Protein backbone atom coordinates (compact mmCIF):
# COMPACT_ATOMS: atom_id res chain seq x y z
CA UNK A 1 0.00 0.00 0.00
CA UNK A 2 1.33 3.41 -0.94
CA UNK A 3 1.06 6.40 1.38
CA UNK A 4 0.51 9.86 -0.04
CA UNK A 5 2.56 12.70 1.32
CA UNK A 6 1.39 16.27 0.78
CA UNK A 7 3.76 19.19 0.91
CA UNK A 8 2.00 22.47 1.46
CA UNK A 9 3.45 25.48 -0.30
CA UNK A 10 1.62 28.74 0.04
CA UNK A 11 0.91 31.51 2.45
CA UNK A 12 4.64 31.58 3.04
CA UNK A 13 6.35 33.81 5.49
CA UNK A 14 9.26 36.05 4.58
CA UNK A 15 12.81 34.81 5.12
CA UNK A 16 14.06 35.16 8.68
CA UNK A 17 16.97 37.40 7.68
CA UNK A 18 14.76 39.85 5.81
CA UNK A 19 14.41 43.31 7.32
CA UNK A 20 11.04 43.92 5.66
CA UNK A 21 9.77 46.35 3.10
CA UNK A 22 10.76 49.96 3.68
CA UNK A 23 8.22 52.71 3.07
CA UNK A 24 9.17 55.66 0.83
CA UNK A 25 9.70 58.13 3.69
CA UNK A 26 12.07 55.83 5.57
CA UNK A 27 13.82 54.80 2.34
CA UNK A 28 14.59 58.47 1.59
CA UNK A 29 15.82 59.04 5.15
CA UNK A 30 18.09 55.97 5.24
CA UNK A 31 19.44 56.80 1.76
CA UNK A 32 20.71 60.12 3.15
CA UNK A 33 22.29 58.42 6.18
CA UNK A 34 23.97 55.45 4.47
CA UNK A 35 25.84 56.43 1.33
CA UNK A 36 26.85 54.02 -1.41
CA UNK A 37 30.47 54.43 -2.54
CA UNK A 38 32.09 53.25 -5.73
CA UNK A 39 35.30 51.26 -5.07
CA UNK A 40 37.45 54.01 -6.69
CA UNK A 41 36.14 56.63 -4.24
CA UNK A 42 37.46 54.65 -1.26
CA UNK A 43 41.04 55.69 -2.03
CA UNK A 44 40.16 59.24 -1.00
CA UNK A 45 38.37 58.26 2.22
CA UNK A 46 39.33 57.10 5.67
CA UNK A 47 37.15 54.17 6.67
CA UNK A 48 36.88 50.95 8.63
CA UNK A 49 35.29 47.88 7.06
CA UNK A 50 32.61 46.32 9.27
CA UNK A 51 32.25 43.22 7.11
CA UNK A 52 30.12 41.91 4.28
CA UNK A 53 26.35 42.05 4.72
CA UNK A 54 23.48 40.82 2.59
CA UNK A 55 19.77 41.44 2.27
CA UNK A 56 16.94 39.80 0.39
CA UNK A 57 13.91 41.30 -1.29
CA UNK A 58 11.39 38.47 -1.37
CA UNK A 59 8.07 38.09 -3.11
CA UNK A 60 6.49 35.58 -0.75
CA UNK A 61 3.14 35.21 -2.50
CA UNK A 62 2.13 35.84 -6.11
CA UNK A 63 0.07 38.90 -5.07
CA UNK A 64 2.84 40.51 -2.99
CA UNK A 65 4.93 43.38 -4.40
CA UNK A 66 7.66 42.15 -6.74
CA UNK A 67 11.16 41.63 -5.39
CA UNK A 68 13.39 44.55 -6.35
CA UNK A 69 17.00 45.71 -6.14
CA UNK A 70 15.79 48.98 -4.59
CA UNK A 71 14.07 47.10 -1.78
CA UNK A 72 17.09 44.85 -1.16
CA UNK A 73 19.39 47.91 -1.17
CA UNK A 74 17.13 49.70 1.33
CA UNK A 75 17.35 46.63 3.54
CA UNK A 76 21.15 46.62 3.17
CA UNK A 77 21.21 50.21 4.35
CA UNK A 78 19.11 49.38 7.41
CA UNK A 79 21.38 46.44 8.30
CA UNK A 80 24.45 48.62 7.79
CA UNK A 81 23.04 51.28 10.09
CA UNK A 82 22.33 48.70 12.79
CA UNK A 83 26.06 47.76 12.65
CA UNK A 84 27.09 51.40 13.12
CA UNK A 85 28.05 51.86 9.47
CA UNK A 86 27.43 54.99 7.44
CA UNK A 87 28.36 53.61 4.03
CA UNK A 88 28.28 50.65 1.68
CA UNK A 89 30.58 49.70 -1.17
CA UNK A 90 28.61 49.40 -4.42
CA UNK A 91 26.18 46.46 -3.86
CA UNK A 92 26.14 43.41 -6.14
CA UNK A 93 22.71 41.83 -6.67
CA UNK A 94 21.48 38.44 -7.91
CA UNK A 95 17.98 37.58 -9.02
CA UNK A 96 16.42 34.17 -8.32
CA UNK A 97 13.09 32.76 -9.40
CA UNK A 98 11.55 29.53 -8.20
CA UNK A 99 14.89 28.13 -7.04
CA UNK A 100 14.45 29.77 -3.63
CA UNK A 101 10.80 28.84 -3.19
CA UNK A 102 11.35 26.12 -0.60
CA UNK A 103 14.58 27.39 0.95
CA UNK A 104 13.40 30.96 1.48
CA UNK A 105 9.65 30.75 0.92
CA UNK A 106 10.00 33.12 -2.04
CA UNK A 107 8.37 33.02 -5.44
CA UNK A 108 11.07 35.39 -6.62
CA UNK A 109 13.90 37.07 -4.78
CA UNK A 110 16.77 39.48 -5.25
CA UNK A 111 19.71 39.17 -2.89
CA UNK A 112 22.24 41.99 -2.63
CA UNK A 113 25.69 41.92 -0.99
CA UNK A 114 27.98 44.77 0.03
CA UNK A 115 30.72 45.56 2.53
CA UNK A 116 29.51 47.89 5.29
CA UNK A 117 31.81 50.80 6.12
CA UNK A 118 32.32 53.30 8.90
CA UNK A 119 33.61 56.31 6.95
CA UNK A 120 35.46 58.95 8.96
CA UNK A 121 36.52 61.05 5.92
Image (cartoon, grey):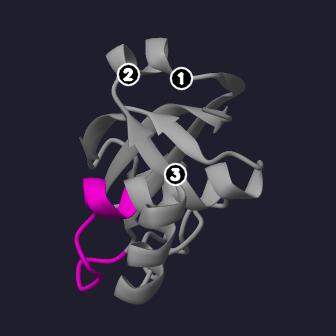
User: Which of disc 3 and disc 2 is earlier in sequence?
Assistant: 2
Q: Can you give x and y, in whole percent of width and height, for residue 104 in the image? A: 51, 53
Q: Tell me the tag on residue 76.
A: 3
- Whether label 2 touches label 3, CB < 8 Å: no
| Foreground disc of the pair 2, 3 | 2
Q: Can you give x and y, in whole percent of width and height, for residue 108 in the image? A: 28, 57
Instruction: Give the extent of the magenta segment.
Output: 61-72
Q: Tell me the tag on residue 29.
A: none
User: Which residue is drawn at the image coordinates 68% and 24% (left, top)?
Assistant: 49
Distance CA(mark 1)–CA(mark 2) = 7 Å
SS category of the residue bearing label 3:
helix
- Whether label 1 touches label 2, CB < 8 Å: yes
Residue on which the image places disc 1: 45
- Image quarter in which the C terminus is found: top right
Q: Is 12 drawn above or below residue 79 in the view shown?
A: below
SS category of the residue bearing label 1:
loop
* Residue 118 horizontal side relative to residue 57, left or right: right
Amino acid sequence: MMALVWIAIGGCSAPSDQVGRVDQENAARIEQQIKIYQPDALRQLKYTSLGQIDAISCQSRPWDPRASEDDATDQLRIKAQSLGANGLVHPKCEKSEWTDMLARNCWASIQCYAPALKVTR
